[in-house]
Image (cartoon, grey):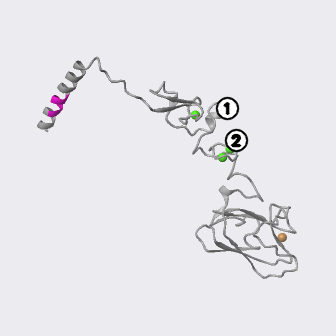
């Protein structure tokens, strides 16, 4: 410890000497720090308002990922912010009110999390109606099985009442009896479905993540 103090004392002397003796070749330090203006004060800078050098003032920050720094809603819009249902893109991911959009009476946020399971069963007695487990989230490559009386409750993919012919959810028409419908969801996405007869009473969404 004693040695350290002596050393640091010596260093100070050397530095003082150096600064005294080198007044005419005082080095102009090349400052190359990038600064971005943060007009809305959310600590995320505007990539289009760029300055190189010493930080002009506290309204300039090193971050350059703000998606809205000067608009009327600027302070409610920055990366990592919580998305709330207000018609604007709060988290700067390019999507407005995602996770909160209601499709077939489901939202991603309220879906029952069944991720990590390889198989999931949806039956028309316990899960086809909202209030049961009609809105579910599963992992990619999960096999979801619909069970029930498809004569009474034919199944179709899509946002009710419009059939989506690109949906991987197989149509179980009203003459298909009670044979279970297995659908393997290989790709992440939102897959709404509904009963082709009870279009607004029986509906749901499989969120694959
Ligand atoms: Ca900002
Ligand atoms: Ca968003
Ligand atoms: Ca929003
Ligand atoms: Cu039905």
The quadrant of the picture showing ligand 1 is top right
- Residue appearing at x 73%, y 58% in the figure: 106
Q: Position of residue 15 (x, y in %)?
A: 22, 26
In this view, 48 is above or below 199? above
Which residues, given as a range, are shown in magenta? 7-11
Give whichever of 17, 206 is nearer the camera: 17
Query: Disc 2 designates what residue?
Result: 88
Query: Disc 1 designates what residue?
Result: 71
Q: Secondary structure at mark 1?
A: loop
- Residue appearing at x 69%, y 51% in the figure: 100
Which part of the image, by quadrant, shows the N terminus?
top left
Q: Position of residue 207 (x, y in %)?
A: 68, 62
Q: Residues within 10 Å of mark 2 (few under 14, many from 20)?
A: some
Label 2 beta carbon less than 8 Å to ligand 3? yes
Distance (Cα) linking label 1 and label 2 = 11 Å
Q: Earlier in the sequence, mark 1 or mark 2?
A: 1
Instruction: Verify whether residue 10 appears in magenta.
Output: yes
């Amino acid at each position: 410890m004693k040695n350290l103090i002596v050393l640091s004392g010596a260093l100070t002397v050397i530095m003082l000497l150096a600064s005294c003796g080198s007044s005419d070749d005082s080095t102009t330090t090349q400052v190359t720090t990038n600064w971005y203006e943060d007009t809305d004060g959310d600590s995320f800078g505007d990539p289009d308002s760029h300055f190189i050098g010493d930080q002009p003032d506290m309204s300039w920050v090193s971050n350059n990922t703000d998606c809205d720094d000067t608009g009327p809603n600027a302070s409610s819009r920055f990366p990592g912010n919580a998305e709330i249902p207000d018609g604007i893109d709060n988290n700067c991911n390019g999507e407005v009110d995602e996770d909160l959009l209601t499709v077939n009476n489901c939202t991603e946020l309220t879906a029952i999390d069944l991720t990590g399971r390889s198989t999931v069963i949806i039956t028309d007695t316990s899960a086809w109606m909202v209030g049961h487990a009609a809105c579910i989230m599963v992992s990619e490559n999960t096999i979801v099985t619909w069970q029930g009386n498809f004569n009474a409750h034919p199944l179709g993919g899509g946002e009710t009442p419009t059939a989506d012919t690109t949906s991987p959810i197989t149509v179980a028409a009203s003459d298909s009896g009670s044979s279970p419908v297995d659908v393997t969801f290989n790709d992440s996405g939102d897959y709404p479905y509904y009963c082709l007869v009870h279009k607004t009473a029986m509906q749901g969404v499989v969120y694959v993540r």
